[in-house]
Amino acid sequence: MKIPLWCLLPLLPLASTFSQMADPDPNQWLEDVTGERALTWARAHNAITQRELEDSPDFKSIHDRLLAIYDSTARIPYVAKRGAFYYNFWRDAQHARGIWRRTTLAEYRKPEPAWEIVLDLDVLATAENENWVWKGENFLYPTYDRALLNLSRGGGDAVVVREFDLSTKSFVANGFSLPEAKSSVDWRDRDHVFVGTNFDAGSMTTSGYPRIVKDWRRGTQLAEAREVFAGESGDVASAGFTSNEPGFHREFVYRAIEFFKGNTYIRVGDKFVKLDLPGDARASTFREHLTVALRSAWSVGGKTYPAGALLAIRWDKFLSGGRDFAVLFKPGPRTSLAGHSNTRHHIIVNELENVRNRLYVHTPLPDGTWSRTPLPAPEFGTTSATAVDDESDDYWLNVTDFLTPSSLILGTLGKPKRELLKQLPAFFNADGLEVTQHEAVSKDGTRVPYFQVARRGLALDGTAPTLLYGYGGFEISETPNYSGGLGASWLERGGVYVLANIRGGGEFGPAWHQTALKANRQRAYDDFIAIAEDLIKRRVTSTPHFGIMGGSNGGLLMGVMFTQRPDLFGAVVCQVPLLDMQRYSHLLAGASWMAEYGNPDVPEEWAYISRYSPYQNVKAGVKYPRILFTTSTRDDRVHPGHARKMVAKMNALHQDVLYYENIEGGHGGAANNRQQAYMSALAFTFLLKQLK
């Protein structure tokens, strides 16, 4: 069981703040997502960008190379074991929307497994005249013969939910089914599901997610479902869900009050009882045990457990009032918890030590203590170990780094022998490239690490085209991974790639995230600036050859860099961004992120948000670097109006800007491999054109 989260200048005088908030926004009409006027505007800007970048000599070769990589049948088909089968969702040149398929372990071991197609999304889309995009499935435990499928029209977060029979490979007539909404659905048992959806007016939160959880019985109308929990309209969401392990079935409700704060309730008899845990803790189950990952220090039972720790206690002991936790992980100054996964008898804990993974196996002992032993893994790169299922001690080990093609290894805890099952081919030539790790010193003296991928013996003369990527939010860690697209489009062409580990992320635990929240958001931006200045100081690059890229919260980072330090960069790629931080909490899912950024409707909080909000801080008379904005009409998480309005404002200021809006694709920006290749080709073509 894991708690779901919702797969984001000088201080203005008070009078000026109120005046600015009261000023009408001449570009607000661009917030009409599918309005004909707004779409006509978007298509006109798309045409300008397409003419320029598609005519570049680099575009076709980059696009074709990327599409070949994304469609390659040599990619690793990652699988999830459900019952006797190993399931995979796959897109390639023959299956643009994708196929959901399954195989056996014996077949999966082969270089070219025989796959049984369970559902062909292209066939379904044609038959139903819908542009279906796959959004995952939820299997019925323990039979795994039914699943709730999530299908999106065009790639948005809102989905249609339909029950599917794995035996007949068909949708269940009169089965569980929900119309399009940002729903939350999970099986209780074969004939009951927990459901949160848009039941009627008032059933969704201001963030656009379910507020009410109901127990829906098979064969009845949704309107007859029994309400079991209701949160507040100002919450992020509420969801009911189950935890199933051999011999253990537990039912929960989670009320997300803020993005990282909420209450967990467990069903005891006919009631849901609130767990006595800190509001920002993450709870999960491991058979007889409750595990708790802390985001803040917790004093309980005469002890204080530090923020970032992973704790464990038996469920029966905890529910009877016991609070003497075993500490499975204790953070250090540069060590954090990257995650954990449960096998039949063990918990694999993934630790991040100076942004490098270390794996340990924890085992409960009869006396109530736990043993801890290392799980061998490569010294460098990004490694993760996840349980194959909860009925064995088998695990998947995934190994990747910037230059080594990813590998998927099958192992069994307690047995030294491991089996290399799959490995990516080399999608680009990495000869002569090397990875180094560096640190920059931020404005307040904080040491901020970053990775650099460059030619060995790079001439430090400031002329290398360099791309700096960052995110810095929501406790998400940026770690090395193999990207054939980046390698083929940028590294092979002589570019330097840099990955920033700025505050706001999770590289050094919850404090690394929390120290850049709300009024302290500028720290994340200062960190990114420090890395940029360090690259210039080290003579890796210089402003004319220096580009930056980021998406979503990283798109906000790009907008801030663009407006605060236009002197540092030669080009900016700003993808699916937040930019109008005065309006963000009123657009789509924006209200759910106020714990991260603050509430712009509160004057005291708008005072600090207004200092960095890109839309409010772009000005006339400033020489800005050239910028490419990309977004998606079907992004129902970060509103495309952010990018649209920024471009319109820059047009009015006679700034040179490019814009491309994919008419579908969701928050990822693309709904299929061809769209992904096209969007990426635009970005890399733009960077090469500006920085070489």
Image (spheres, helix red, strand yellow):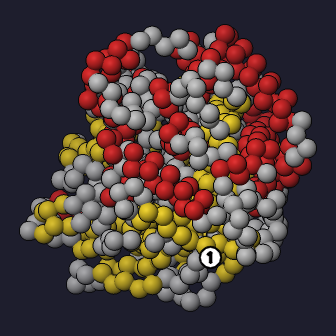
Residue 499's spot in the image, x, y percent? 58, 59
Quarter that holds the N terminus = bottom left
Image quadrant where residue 330 sits = bottom left
687 lies left or right of 603: right
User: Residue 541: which quarter of the image?
Assistant: bottom right
Instruction: Give the residue at x 54% y 56%.
Output: 533
Count of marks, rendered view: 1
Say whether residue 111 is left or right of residue 450. Answer: right
Q: Nearer the viewer, residue 102 or 274?
A: 274
Which amino acid type corresponds to the residue marked 1 in the rendered image? Leu
Q: Nearer the viewer, residue 113 or 354?
A: 354
Identify which residue is drawn at 89% across, 35% down.
55
Q: Residues within 10 Å of mark 1 (few under 14, many from 20)?
A: some
In the image, residue 604 above or below residue 284:
above
Q: Which residue is mark 1?
A: 410
Task: Identify whether 68 is placed above or below 60.
Answer: below
How far from the left and from the top, in percent, is residue 81? 59, 62
Callout 1: helix, strand or loop?
A: strand
Find residue 572 and report its image quarter: top right
Instruction: Tell me residue 660's x, y (percent).
Output: 71, 30
Pinpoint residue 99: horizontal percent, then vertical percent.
74, 46
Residue occupying the point 66% across, 10% down: 37
Check the image and name the residue furthest to the left.
Answer: 302
> Which residue is pictured at 43% across the width and 41% down the height?
6
| Residue 319 visible, this orientation | yes
The one of 332 and 288 positioned closer to us in this rendering: 332
Vertical position of residue 286 compared to residue 279: above or below: below
Is residue 345 visible in the rendered structure shown here?
no
